[in-house]
Image (cartoon, helix red, strand yellow):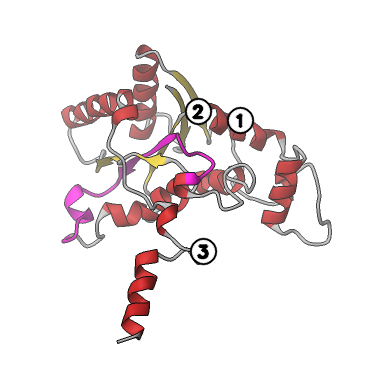
Amino acid sequence: MRVLIVHAHHEPQSFNAAMTREATAALIAAGSEVIVSDLYAMNFDPVSDRRNFVTIKNAARLRQQDEEAHAAEHNGFASLLQAEMDKLAWCDTLILQFPLWWFGMPAILKGWVDRVFAVGRAYGNRRWFDVGVFAGKRAMCSVTVGGLEQVYTDQGINGPMGSILFPINHGILGFTGFAVVEPFIVYGPTRISDDERVSHLRRYRDRVVGLNVAPIIAGPKTLDYDEHLVLKTSRRSASDHDLT
């Protein structure tokens, strides 16, 4: 495998950092190639603006998608962003490593997505989901959560983790074509014992080595949807209902 790990934690001694080190060592030992984009170490700027581009389509007004499409056609992305885009094109597997902050990604990782997943490079021209730009590649969120697991269930006050991660798994990774692997989640790493943390790292090692066969989250099939992106069966059912 060719694996890109995008690491988003500011503390080198964090459990997130331990997970990235464990994954890197396990993958290399298994014969995979690994690149790590450590966003804090890179001092990655999450703010998306004209600095994304070395080309200009419209100097009077910044229309983000228009400028991205123009840059994609004219090799007009800033060198930092182009380097990250090249890593995405190179990898066959993407791992997003991050702590859950406010039910989402840290801003630095969301900014990486905002700037790197550009029109013409990550999506566009109706290339999405199973016919997306990254179709044939796999992606997985590896996440630490401050609370314990029971809080993130149907009965827990925060609700199920699948719902919390849906905007990332479906709206970012799935949308751009990745086959989305079931997330690897460690709950309360600062609240559990050293032995439990070692056990989680061991499980994570097994997961990353087997990413090419790990279970994936089912996503939509574009042929099941009409030109309005509505399920064909739903529209037929609605028409049948109108006739009764």
The amino acid type of the residue labelled 1 equals Asp
Mark 2 to mark 3: distance in Å? 32 Å
Q: Is residue 209 left or right of residue 113?
A: left
The amino acid type of the residue labelled 2 equals Cys
Task: Determine whether the residue tagged by mark 2 lies in a helix, strand or loop.
Answer: loop
**Mark 1 lies on residue:** 86
**Mark 2 lies on residue:** 91
Above or below residue 200? Residue 231 is below
Magenta stretch? 131-155
Task: Determine whether the residue tagged by mark 3 lies in a helix, strand or loop.
Answer: loop
Mark 2 to mark 1: distance in Å? 9 Å
Task: Determine whether the residue tagged by mark 1 lies in a helix, strand or loop.
Answer: helix
Say if the magenta span includes residue 139: yes
- At horizontal 35% and vertical 14% (from top left) the residue drawn is 30
Above or below residue 2? Residue 183 is below
Q: Is residue 46 left or right of residue 51?
A: left
The amino acid type of the residue labelled 3 equals Glu
**Mark 3 lies on residue:** 227
